[in-house]
Image (cartoon, helix red, strand yellow):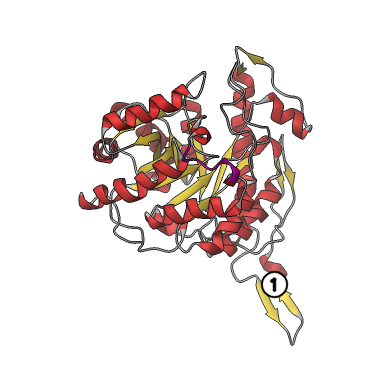
Amino acid sequence: MSNDYPIHLAVALDGAGWHPAAWRLSTAAPADLFRPQYWAGLVQEAEHGLLDFVSIEDRFAATRFPDGDRSAVVHGSLDSALIASHVAPLTDLIGLVPTAVAPHTEPFHISKSVATLDYVSTGRAGLRVRTSADPREFANIGRRSAPELHAGQPSADFVTEAFREVSDYVEVVRRLWDSWEDGAEIRDIDTGRFIDRERLHYIDFEGPSFSVRGPSITPRPPQGQPPVVLLGHDERGHALIGRDADIGLITPRDAADVAATTTSIRGTAVSSGRAAQDVKVLADLVVLLDSTTAAAEARRERLDGLSATGSSSDAATFVGTSEDLADLLLEWSAAGLDGFRLRPAILHEDLAHITRDLVPVLQRREAFRPHYTTSTLREHFGLPRPTSRYAAA
């Protein structure tokens, strides 16, 4: 079962925050960004706020410098799956969602990594899969040629192929998680039988990007399949969410956009043989919060002043109070959303505003849980534990 409250909340963790100059504030501690206690503190704060999950960004090239401003960004990052594995024993109920970059990582390896995280966290792992068109990432990995960019954008053919690859990636990972049936481990000392070989299955996936025989070498995760999270910005991305995601992230601009997008995603889910409720849809929002709107605006102006190029985002940005943000979340929720993934502009400050100000406001409005009632990430979202496809066959 999941909670009966209308809004799910998650936060996206990246560096010092989603504003490129967040690390330059006098209250920031940039020396802590590559220390384990920094990440543990953030996730523990998110769990204090009863959030559904934290996602952790990942990349295979250093953050781009804005033109003419080589001091404005955090340069470098840690591995998201290893951060999640470190934090898992230090938390109890919050979901942990690292990021995999499909063109540059093997699905067999990622399936094993996230299955391990699911064991370490006792059923709280998820996986966000994304693609990449960054030539620097392709050059760093060196497995294939980088796409040609025109006005900074890849061709339509490349995008189509990239989305197909993400879909195949998710399919391979799911098959590998299913390749050990539940109860495949016997562990009988007297007979010397550790596994029931009849319950291990070749997945025999063949595609343009991957050829994977299987089975996995890791027993089926506690959740069966940790939830897969996909971010989509346009019709192609929304269709991918409807077909392949358990949790979809979208970037709407208003309630009408929310209604159209969620309707489209759920329609695709149904036409793909799924139930509409099989995919949960969350909106991404960059947030910069304070006790008054004027104070929040002043914080944004100060941040923009520390960066020659200011900030830009693929998601809408909210600047204001927690009360006003709650109004927006409830309006968009009524338009069809299951919840929100908030991107704190300044992690250590805006995350605290989310957990200590926004959450109590939503609780008073009976829109968010007063305590955790479930223990796994799938349960938080009311997603049933799936049976292995091979056991069903």
Is 307 one of the magenta-colored residues?
A: no
Nearer to me, 82 or 268: 82
Residue 85 % position (x, y): 60, 57
Instruction: Identify the residue at image location x=63%, y=37%.
Output: 59
Residue 6 % position (x, y): 28, 48
From where the camera sits, is residue 273 visible? Answer: no
Instruction: Identify the residue at image location x=61%, y=37%.
Output: 166
Quadrant showing the N terminus: bottom left
Q: Mark 1, residues whose alpha carbon is within 10 Å: few (<14), some, or many (≥20)? A: some
Is 27 one of the magenta-colored residues?
A: yes
Nearer to me, 357 or 123: 357
Residue 256 % position (x, y): 29, 27
Residue 182 % position (x, y): 59, 67
The residue most toward the top is: 151
Q: Give the number of callouts.
A: 1
Q: Overall secondary structure of the magenta stretch?
A: loop
- With 123 as the anchor, is 259 left or right in this view? left
Nearer to me, 71 or 321: 71
The residue most toward the right is: 142
The residue most toward the front is: 26
Residue 130's place in the image compared with 303, above or below, is below
Residue type highlighted by circle 1: Asp
Residue 215's place in the image compared with 56, above or below, is below
Instruction: Identify the residue at image location x=62%, y=46%.
Output: 34
From where the camera sits, is residue 246 visible? Answer: yes
Give the SS element for disc 1. Answer: loop
Which segment is the magenta one? 26-31
Residue annotated with mark 1 = 196
